């Protein structure tokens, strides 16, 4: 069974982390600092308010209440609460090509392999060095338009503007060990392992965690206007195990150099393992944050920003040429050495626990507990 004791990175005692657990009276905002646990709920109420403080790491010792926390027994929640759940798409060449394939297939997985080969023959696969919005990128766009291969996904992949969408509502994400939801109406779907940035109201990047941007490929492939239906479903956003906060031993440069591993194990004996480097991203994380939060759009409670996935699993599962899709009961394990492990098991969206605890419920709970006390 997944627990914080097994999900946190091996060097967790050397860093600072923000996480949430289900306490006896309600959610608790917890800090782990150099191996010690502190309750931040009395001072701030929420992780969002804590990370909006001028110095979140310094606030741990200054305002946190030391407590004894059994990491093996604690009931983990997604580490974000009131923050907006935002996501970037098509930020890697490989995932960009897969989105184009979905569009060309119009949701029919049987056509994927032949279209994949055709598009690689036209534009290649090594687009990592192409700077979105550059003269070279615009020249490629003109070439593709002339060939009749231009796509809305190529527009956000190599054009000046990134795709930034809403993955879910605040408090709707699930944490480690929870079920993740796959809509039963989808026959072609996949996990999307990603690094997720913690951004405060000022646009500062404070740290990062792991995320699974569960995706219904056939739904989005039918029409990009169905993105909300493909992305925002019950239990379809997983985050955790904890937000690793930046300090002298962990910085944004560690994120740029991070490696993500995805492992899927099915009850049918299917297994898959892939890995990808954040460093091959086509847009720097600071650029993506600036496109999300700026003078034209604010997030007063901060935001969680998925950076996009460096790969989408395409290994055949049910039949040759049909690619990958989830089955109920798949164990999905996303890992990165400095961020830990995010592990969940798939189920139908209508079989996962329904989302009942929203912002109103959290505010009522905190008021009943007399929190925050500041």
Image (cartoon, rainbow, N blue to C red):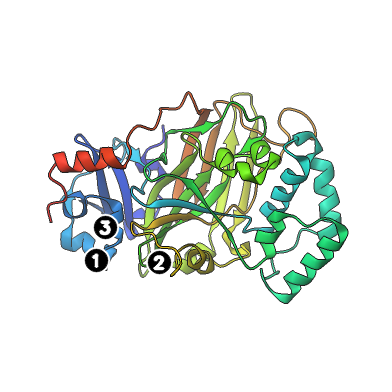
**Which residue is identified by label 2?**
203
Comparing 137 with 10, the one in front is 137
Instruction: Assign the N terminus to one quadrant of the image.
Output: top left
Instruction: Assign the C terminus to one quadrant of the image.
Output: bottom left
Categorize mark 2 by other alpha carbons within 10 Å: few (<14), some (14-19), many (20+). many
Residue 35: image quadrant is: bottom left
Q: Nearer the viewer, mark 3 or mark 2?
A: 2
Residue appearing at x 18%, y 56% in the figure: 64
**What's the distance in space between the residues labelled 1 and 3, CA to CA?**
11 Å
The earlier-in-sequence mark between 3 and 2 is 3
Marks 1 and 3 in Cβ contact (< 8 Å): no
Q: Which mark identifies residue 58?
A: 1
Residue 280: image quadrant is: bottom right
Q: Residue 207: percent from the left, percent from the top? A: 40, 61
**Left or right placement of residue 104 versus residue 205 in this view:** right
Q: Nearer the viewer, mark 1 or mark 3?
A: 3
């Amino acid at each position: 069974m997944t627990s914080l004791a097994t999900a946190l990175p091996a060097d967790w005692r050397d860093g600072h982390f923000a996480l949430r657990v289900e306490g006896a009276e309600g959610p608790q905002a917890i800090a782990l600092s150099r191996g010690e646990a502190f309750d931040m709920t009395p001072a701030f109420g929420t992780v969002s308010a804590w990370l909006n403080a001028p110095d979140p790491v310094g606030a741990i010792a200054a305002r946190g209440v030391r407590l004894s926390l059994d990491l093996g027994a604690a009931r983990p929640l997604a580490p974000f609460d009131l923050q907006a759940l935002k996501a970037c798409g098509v930020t890697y060449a490989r995932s960009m090509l897969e989105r184009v394939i979905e569009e060309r297939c119009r949701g029919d997985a049987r056509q994927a392999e032949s279209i994949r080969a055709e598009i690689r023959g036209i534009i290649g696969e090594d687009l990592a060095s192409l700077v979105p919005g550059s003269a070279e990128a615009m020249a490629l766009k003109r070439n593709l338009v002339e060939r009749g291969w231009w796509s809305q996904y190529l527009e956000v992949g190599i054009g000046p503007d990134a795709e930034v969408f809403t993955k879910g509502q605040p408090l709707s994400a699930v944490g480690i060990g929870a079920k993740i939801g796959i809509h039963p109406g989808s026959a072609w779907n996949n996990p999307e392992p990603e690094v997720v940035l913690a951004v405060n109201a000022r646009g500062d990047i404070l740290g990062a965690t792991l995320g699974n941007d569960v995706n219904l490929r056939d739904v989005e492939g039918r029409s990009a206007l169905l993105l909300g239906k493909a992305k925002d479903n019950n239990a379809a956003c997983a985050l955790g195990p904890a937000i690793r906060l930046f300090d002298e031993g962990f910085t944004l440069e560690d994120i740029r150099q991070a490696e993500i591993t995805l492992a899927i194990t099915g009850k049918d004996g299917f297994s898959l393992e892939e890995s990808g480097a954040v460093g091959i991203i086509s847009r720097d994380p600071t650029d993506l944050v600036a496109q999300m939060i700026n003078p034209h759009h604010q997030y007063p409670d901060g935001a969680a920003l998925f950076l996009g996935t460096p790969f989408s699993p395409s290994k055949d599962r049910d039949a040759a040429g049909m690619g990958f899709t989830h089955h109920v009961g798949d164990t999905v394990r996303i890992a990165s050495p400095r961020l830990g492990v995010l592990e969940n098991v798939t189920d139908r969206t209508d079989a996962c626990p329904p989302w009942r605890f929203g912002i109103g419920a959290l505010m009522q709970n905190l008021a009943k507990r007399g929190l925050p006390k500041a």
